Structures are given as structure tokens and as C-alpha cells.
Amino acid sequence: MRYMATYDLMETVRNTNQWLGASALAMASYPAFAMFPNPALAWMAAWGEVTERTFSRMVMKPDWNIPPFVGSNGQDRIVVEEVVMQRDFGDLLHFRVQGRTVPKRRVLLVAPMSGHYATLLRSTVISLLPDCDVFITDWHNARDIPVSAGKFDVEDYTLYLVDFLRELGPHTHVIAVCQPAPLALAATAYLAEEDPAAQPRSLTLIGGPIDPSAAPTEVTDFGHSVTMGQLEELMIQRVGFKYAGVGRMVYPGLLQLNSFISMNAETHFNAFKDQISRVASGDAHEHDKHNKFYDEYLAVMDMPAEFYLSTVDRIFKTGEIASNSFTVKGKKVDIGKITTVAVKTVEGSKDDISAPGQCIAALNLCTGLPDDKKASHVEEGAGHYGIFAGKSWRNNIRPLVLDFIDDNEEQTPPGHRKRGKPVNDPANMNVAV
């Protein structure tokens, strides 16, 4: 019960700060105070507005809000979200483009279960939609999953990916971002041996810890500095009575958020200080750069305890993927069995979470794959976020990934897109979107 009490205490602290922010905003905005203008009241209202917004976002799942895009015939294409497969711990979500008749590259984006919702990849989805038929793994917040649903660890995650790929069929191209990269590799190897007909056509691994020991970071150092017993004692709590998952053991999102912020505490402090200043002077607005980033960054979800612990133990500590000794239900998953699925790795030279060297290790593990089916790219100057959602992704990495998909794609209509040319190139406008 002390774990449950700790969970509720964190929620109480969050709720109290949200209330303080709302109270400060309401008090400083009291109409009678307008008779006696005081700059301190403007700063108090600004602090309250930023504080209330900050702490309220921590318990809200962001909306996808995928905007329409203009097809090659000049018409807006509306994007609708639909659930293809519904499971206890996550859904297979499809972004259906209304009015699209020409088949596109079928892409499965494997989102991380690392404290943030799949909406963290919203900009990645938006950038791919004009060229691809996009699906994504939409993981659920563990606090909302009843204990009766059972456990969910790295093996269950891998089997979810296997089921999703079987549902999508063999003409699928997988893009795994960050934490799920080793498990996406394992799922592909599992299918190579158990169900070859369901294998994807290509697998792109972006900034994932395939071999964490290849290039140590603060994340890997922390994993090796604590024992599993210490980790369970310090990080795992029981969901409180407020949520449907009451009693479930989780790694709380608020605890993970604290870890995220502490890694760059000064940067975040300055960002919020500057935002309060902008609100006080009237220069801020609802959709400014600060709100756009932090509305997503602060929205955190709880992870099942068994998933978090098994990730640290089996991926980081014992390196089961790196040593090709990963097992699912007692059966070894041999990555060397991948012989037909093209594999590409993408890394950022300034990635401080999955440093260069960790992800490219996947290519050495694919011993049964010919060299012409392997590719790698290191983006100079790019950090972890930039390799899948920033300027580096949009301008450099995305075109390379699309080229890699085209090299291993049979269903893309002729003339839809030529290697190396942007989607809005006149030469590529002859096929209706």
C-alpha cells in the first residue's frame, strides 16, 4: 500500500500545483484590481497561467490533430483516425486519407513506450502522409488498464508487433523510433522463422538501443549503476484508487518526466521563465512555440512495471538483443534468420540518449542478410528528437527513408515519386493523390 500512497502523493502534488496556478490567475485577474494597475499583478497572472497549463497537461493525452494536406490535384485531403486492431495495452491505428484512390507505400510507425504517448510522433506522421499509407502503434496509459488484463513485458510488446504485422500483410515497411527499435528487430526475426509470409518488406531503425554498450550515455550508465532490486524499489509504484488500473504496478509517467527534465534542468527552467515573461508582456499566444512543444513533452503516461523492468534488464543490462540471445516464450529469436527484409539504421551525431554506434549494431546482427539489403545513415548535428521530428528529419532523413522504401517496394505506382526528388516536384505530380 505504501507504493499506492506514493503514487497518490505525486498526483496530489501535481493537482495542488495546478490549483495554485489557477488560483493565482483568477486572483490577479480580479476586475476590481484593474482600478489600481500594478505590474506585479500581471506577473502573478502570467505565472498562474503558465503553471496551470503546465501541470494540467501532465494528465492529458494530446489529440492527434492531423491537418488536411493538399493533394496533387489541388484538393484538400482530410485525414481520419481509425482503429484497425484494438488490444488491452495498445491499438493499431490507421490514418485514413479520404478520397485517396492510388495505393501508397504502407508504413507502420512503431512508437516508443517510454513515458510519452504515440502523439510524440505527430509531426513524423504528418510528414509521411502525403507519400505513405500510415499506421502507428498507439500504446495505452497503464494506469487506465485494469489489473485483470494481465502483464505486459518486452516479450508481449514483441508479440503485439508480430500480430500487427500479420494484420497489415507482407507489403509493409516498418519505421521503429528509439526505444522499440530492438523489439521491432526481434519481431521481424520472429516472423522470419515462424511466419515468413508476414514479414515486412523493409525495416528502418531510428536512434534505437540495439547495443547500448557500443556507445555509453547517461541512460546506459544509469542502467548499469543500479541493481534490479534497487530499480524496483525506487521506481515502481501501484496505481492509486482514482484510475481504472488501481493496484497495477507501474513506472509512473510523472517520475519519468522528472528524469527527462533533470537531464536538462537549466534549459527547461529558462524556457518557462521566458514564457512567463512573454505572457506578462502579451507576446505569447495559445499555439506559440513553447506551448506547442511542452503540451506534448509534459503529457506523460505510466508504463507497466514489467515492461520497464524487463527493458532495463534484458535490453540494457544483459544485452539480449546485442548478443542475439533474446527469447520469446522460451524460444530463441535468431536475428540471423532475417534474409529478405531490407534493414536501414539512422543515428544522430549529437544524440545523447542513443548515441551513434548503438543502432547501427543491428546490421552486424543480420548475418543472413546480403549487404545490398543493408543501409545506414548518421545525421551530422542532429540530436535524438531531431532525427525523427525536427528539421534534420524533414530535410535530410525523410527523403532518404522514402528512397530506401522505394528501393524495396513493389506497389508504389510508377511515376509517383522518383528517387531523390521532393514530393512537390512537378515531375511527380502526374499521379492523383
Image (cartoon, grey):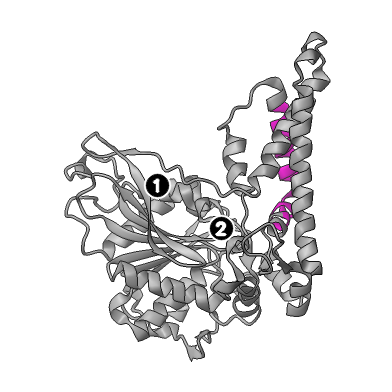
Tag 2's secondary structure? loop
Q: Which mark is residue 127?
A: 1
Q: Position of residue 219 (x, y in %)?
A: 68, 66
Is residue 360 visible from the viewing direction of this image?
no
* Near-viewer residue (379 or 253): 253
* Tag 2 residue: 349
Q: Which residue is pictured at 59% across the width and 58% down the height?
A: 351
| Residue density around tag 1, few if under 14, some if 14–19, many if 20 or more, within 10 Å | some
* Near-viewer residue (128 or 113): 113
Q: Which residue is pictured at 79% across the width and 37% down the height?
A: 20
Is residue 173 visible from the viewing direction of this image?
yes
Q: Which mark is residue 293?
A: none
Part of the protein shown in magenta: 258-278
* Near-viewer residue (165 or 304): 304
| Residue density around tag 2, few if under 14, some if 14–19, many if 20 or more, within 10 Å | some
Quarter of the rendering containing residue 314? bottom right
Front position among marks 2 and 1? 1
Is 25 left, or right, of 325 in this rendering?
A: right
